[in-house]
Every structure is written in C-alpha cells, then in structure tokens.
Image (spheres, grey):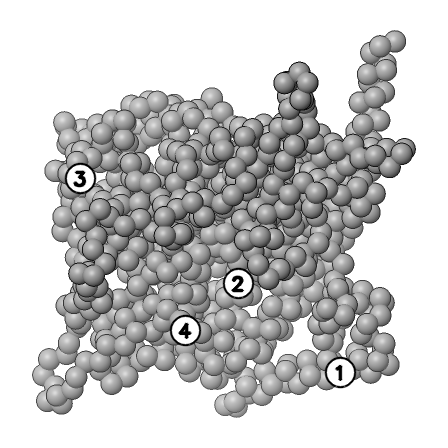
Amino acid sequence: MSDQSLNSLTESSYEKNLIARFPGFVTPDHRDGYEGILVLPEKLVEVAKVLKDEMGYDFLSSVTAVDYLPDKKMEVVYHTYKSIGGPILVFKTQVSRTDPKVPSLVPVYPGAELQEREAWDLMGIQFDGHPDLRRILTWEGFNGHPLRKDWCEPYYEQETKPFRSRWPAAQSHRKEEQTPFGQNVNYPRDFDPDSYEPDNDAMLYASLRNSITKESGSDLVSDTLIVNLGPQHPSTHGVFRVAVALEGETVVGLKPVMGYLHRNHEKIGERNTYLMNMPFTDRLDYFSSMSNNFGYALAVEKLLGIKPPERSEYLRIIMAEFTRICNHLLAIGFFLNDLGAYFTPVLYAIEEREFILDIFEAVAGSRMMCNYFRFGGVSRDLPEGILEKIRKLVYERLPRKIDELDLFLTNNEIIRSRTESVGVLTPEQAIAFSESGPVLRASGVPYDIRRADPYGIYERFDFDVAVRYHGDSYDRYLIRIDEMRQSIRILQQAVRDLPAGPVLEAKPPYQVMMPVGESYGRVESPKGELGYYLVSNGSPNPWRYHIRAPSFINLTAFESMCIGQKVADLVIILGSIDIVLGEVDR
Amino acid sequence: MDGMGIIRGLGVTFKHFIDTFLDDLVWLGKRYYTKEGLAHRMSGDNRGIFTIQYPEEKQPVPEEFRFVPFLVYDEGSNGERHVRCTSCGICAEVCPPQCIWIVRAIDHKTGREIPEPKEFYIDVDICMNCGFCAEYCPFDSIMMDHDYELSVYDRHSKNIYNKERLLKPVSYYSKIRPTNYASEIAAHAEAESIKSAMQI
C-alpha cells in the first residue's frame, strides 16, 4: 500500500493556501494514488506566478503531458521545487482531447520552453503564448502525435507486451519483412510523393532570424551568416545540430535542433511491462547506466511501497558513485577534446574508466548496459574477489589518478584563458532555465538532490556539495573534479560500512502487480536531475512513462550562454554542459 | 611564472611517456602474448600501456558476462540429449524486445501438448543481452553465453538462431559459469534433501 493516497488527503500548507486563494479554480487531486492540485487552464499562469514569486517554488523541474484516452482528457503535469530544498509540489491542468489548448508557462518559468515543445510534438497539446512552438523531437513534416494512445507505430503488433505471437504459437519471421515497402514509415492517406515539396527547415531558419539580437548603431554593414553545426560533427557529443547565426565570428542567434536519435523510448515504455523497462533505461544516458536504473527503480518502488534491504542499498550507492566518477572522467576528457587537446587527456581518463567498467562487468554482466537494479534491491551480489578490487581502486588508484588529472589540467594557462568567463550563467538564470546538476552548482546554487531531497541512504554519508560561483565553463570543469573527489569520499565510507545480508528479498515475480497511481522518482545523475514520472492504471504495463532528461533541459540555457561568444567558444560551452544524445532525444 | 601550468602538465605527460616503455623494458619483451603479461596488464598495478592485442590475445571475460542466450541439455548415459526446456514460455514473456519465439511440441498420438519445445527461435539481431530470460527461467534451461564473435555476412538468413544452433551441453555451461553451476547443484541437493526429509 503506497503512501501516495495519504498525501492526497493531507495537502501541504502551500496547496491549502492556493485552494483558498483561487476558489473553484484550484482543487486538490482526489484520485486514488495521485497527489497535488488541479488547476483550471484559465488561471494557470496566475497560479504559477503566485507559486514562483510568493511561495518560493522557483524551480520548475518537469513538464509532462499525459493522455487519458478513456476519460477523453489530456493532462499537463508540472513538478516544482524550491531551490533551497524541500519536497515537491505537483500541479496539473486538464483539457479536452479534441482541442487541447493550455496557456504556456514560458513567461513565468523560461525552463518550460523545450518541454512544452516536446508536449506539443509528441502529444499535440497547443501552448498559447509559447514563443516558438515547433516540433522538437520529430521532423517538422511528421504526421501525427506519437505519444497519443490512438497512434500506432509502423511495426505495430499489439497494444502491450508480451505479444501473443511469440508463445505458444511462434511466428518465425520478422515484422519488418511483413510491412509494405519494407520501411519503418507510415504515410498519411493523402500523401502524394510527386507533389510533396519539403520545406527545407524554413520554420527553423525563420525562428532563428527572429531571435537574432542585433546591436544597433554600428555603421559597418555586415551580413548575418547562418551556419549549421552538425549533426555530423566530431564535437557535438552525438548527433546534435545547432543552427547558428553569425556576424563574423560572433554568435548572434542560436537554435539547437535535436531529435536525430529519437527512438520514442516513452512509447516503447508504455508497451513494455514494468520489469522490461529496466534494460531500456540503460540506453538513455549510455555513459552512466547505473544511475538511470536507480531512478527507475526508485520511481517503481515508490508506487509499490517497498524498500530494498540494507546491503543492496549500500551496493546501489557504490554503483551510483562509481557511475558518477565514470561519467565525470569522460566529461572532462571530452571537454578537453573539444578544446583541442586532441585525445591525450581523454585517454588518460578512459584508462581509469576501464577499471571501473571491469568492475561493472564482473558484477552486473555488462560494461555499459548494466541492467543491475531490480524493484526491491539489486539483481545479484558481488562475486568473489570484487570487493578487493573495489577497495584497491577506491583507496589507492582513483584518488591518485584524480589528483594527477587535476595537476595535469587545472592550472594549464591555455585552458584557463580559453574557458574562464566563457558561457557565463548567472544563478538566477540557472534556476529560471531549470538547469540542474553540475551546471546549476557551477553557477553558485548549492542544490544537490542527494542533500535537498535525499533518496536511498544518502543521509548516512558525510560529503560536501560541490559549488562554484563564477558560472563559466572553467567552473563547470572544476566542479566535476570536485564532485569526483566527493564521490571517492562517499565510496570509501560505503565500502567500509558494507553490511552482509540479502540483496533482494524473495525474488519478485516478473509480472509486477502495480497499484493505481502516479509517482515521480528522481536521482542526482551525473548530468543533473534525472526524473521518472510513472502513471499506473493497475495493469502490468505503465499508462504513462516519462523521463525528465537532464541533458535535454540543460540545453534550454544553451542559447543565452552562447550569444555574444565566438564560434570556437560555442563548442566549449556545449562540452561543458555535458550532454548525451541518448538522453536528449530518448 | 607564466606558463608553469603548462610545463607541469607536460611533466605529467612525459612521466606517462617514460612509464609506457619502462614496463616493456622491465619485462624484457615478454609483456605481450603471454598469460602473465596479460594478467599484469589487466590489473591496476601496471604503469605502462595496457592495450590487449586483440585478436591474438583475448581478455578473459568474467563469469557474469552476458551475451546471446543458449539452451542447455543434459547428456544421458547413451549420449542422448535431454533438453531441459519445457516451453513454459516465461522467457518469451519476459524478454523486453520480444525476440524469443517458441512453439510447443504436440504428441502425435494423443494430440496433447508435451513439455518440450518443437521450435525455439531467438532473433539475435534484436536481443538486448539483458539476461532476463536466464534470470527468470524456472528450469535453468536457458543461460547467457560468453561468445561474442558472432558476425556474419547476411543477417536475414543467419541471425535467427533455431533450436539446433542454440542447444549446448551442460559441460559447456559448467565450464563457462562454474560458480553459477555450483550454486545450481547445491540448490538441487538442498531441494532433494528437503524432499527426502519430508517423505520420511
């Protein structure tokens, strides 16, 4: 029995205040297993302003859309936090499915920009007042809205897995051999390939031209050059494209274009059962797979109301902190790669990462796609001899090598002169743009979920929250070295205190019986706040499965960080935000 | 002094450069293509290059490593094969990309189903190597293999593995996964002893 229903009965004082101030427009969400308040669309912007300015809920963490096909409604769910720490406040608004129009919250919370575009793209909800409502994860001529419940993909077989065709009567051929034209594409009924003319990104370039901040009063007449950086580019950390408007070498306008790696992970998640989703979460942020597993396991365990045993809690922390070191080593390495230090620092960092990946391989079975966490613990215990290897790494090799990296890179004059004061993000901007993780902490806001809203057993560990105050790319590099040192501290304590015991209480069945309700589980992943929003209707498959991807939302500030900088600095700023396209595009 | 940071960094690189070849010299050239050299390069104590010269030398994979699944058969006294799989279908139900296809065998005379798979296909192209089939099989009949050198020239005809391709003997399983096999034997022995204790 989860305690979600208890939450819906005892609203927080903030929620009560809002209900009293806007009678009739704000009501508590009394659905079984749900929490938060329901706001009518007419008063949404006003309620958001009150929340942000008067009640201190200035950090909009996630904007999600849910399609309730049986009720003929669509719901937009907003999760907000205070940037000084504390529990969540969820507010939602409901609109009809046939003409979904919601006022945009971008004037109040600028961080909602990319997420509202995603809700428009994948669900079809129109946001009135959004500055630039275009499709973001699918291409601009895409037909339909993929996450709606009545939209079927081209290889559609059945609504939910497991498919009846696999057992007991097998079809020994692939679905792709059965589709007409053999292609993973559904053409709309009235599509005529001869008369179709692609618009060649006209909307993208038009919005880019509209966003150019031109300096007036200069008597030099110059043309603005529009250049595409990517999607095939060695320094964009994946298939990521940036349309840049340049005057000479200075950036005057910038629009990120993503979606080249979009795999519709959330729709696949709705077809899967809860257990089947676990290996898919590995593939989100593929450099730090244990963190993704952790967030999903937390969200499901919140719904189920179960807690893992002690030993597996410690193992989870050990794996999560190793993942943080893995990721930061790679982030620093590729940041240096973007600067031009071609491959020497990366390979020094990758060498250390290899030893951590060997530990993952011995424990979980696979270096990158670990699939280690289960609901109620971890899948298997440490094999023989691994604890010795972990101790050797944590006490001897890793601290020495992190110090060596620090000595090697931190005071290098070239790095300092190229990254100091480049891409400055003020703390107010960082909170407004919903940045999280190292980007937020490098701007001076000491918000770390492991301290602000602890999960697992992080309260027992003694570590500092790394903060830096300048908000430039150099600070974003320094903070990753700081965080690696703090991770070593946590690891040393966890390895010292690791208790004996079971790692999974009574092997759970593969079909998990979920109670009805929603849950939002979030972890401090190495890139930022990774959140999983799950809506369950009691069936073995999730009704809605949304990932609050930190890399995706950290890109909201990319534009404002780059305006006025040179093109070469653009690559550095992108490297310092540290994105992974698997997470940006899902 | 300006430039000290760069010089100190170059000092680190120079140390790495010396260490790279120092280890090779100390080992007098026996650092590659020998078992001791491989073990030294894989441990954390090495200071030199730690490249493993694949394909001449291969890094031994740990026991838990999971690649494509395989079916296990027990070998009888006459060399006959007892396939452990009973085609219960749990692996097909739990597989995330749904790459396992099973057809249950039907007894010709009675028309009833027998707990054996007539056909068992795994589409290796979409297998995620997650290991759920091996984890949730109640009869220990499907296990994760260690062989990763499976490239072929034509994926349409060769990458759907049928039952013959998937069946491997228990001796192979105990060789690649000794600890798992030992715990399986121990669990069976415990179950047997509990059963015989209850019968007494």
- Please tell me whether residue B169 is drawn above or below residue A540 in the rendered image: below
Q: Measure how far apart labels 4 and 2 are at the Cα level.
A: 22 Å
x, y percent for residue A162:
49, 33
Q: Measure how far apart labels 3 and 1 are at the Cα level.
A: 67 Å
Q: Residues within 10 Å of mark 1 (few under 14, many from 20)?
A: few
Tag 3 subunit: A
N-terminal-most mark, 4 or 3: 3
Mark 2 vs mark 1, foreground winner is 1
Residue A233 disc label: 4
Q: Which residue is mark 2?
A: A328
> Could you tell whether A479 is left or right of A384 in the image?
left
Between A171 and A430, the residue placed more toward the observer is A171
Q: Measure how far apart labels 4 and 3 are at the Cα level.
A: 38 Å
Q: Secondary structure at mark 1?
A: helix
- Please tell me whether residue A306 is drawn above or below residue A268 in the rendered image: above
Q: Which residue is mark 1?
A: B21
Q: Residues within 10 Å of mark 4 (few under 14, many from 20)?
A: few
Residue A100 disc label: 3
| Label 1–label 4 contact, CB within 8 A | no
Q: Measure how far apart labels 3 and 2 are at the Cα level.
A: 41 Å
**Residue A93 appears in view:** yes
**Residue A462 appears in view:** no
Mark 3 vs mark 2, foreground winner is 3
Q: Which residue extends farthest front?
A: B109
- Please tell me whether residue A28 is drawn above or below residue B43 in the rendered image: above
How many numbered badges does the structure rendering display?
A: 4
Q: Secondary structure at mark 2?
A: helix
Q: Are marks 1 and 4 on the same chain?
A: no
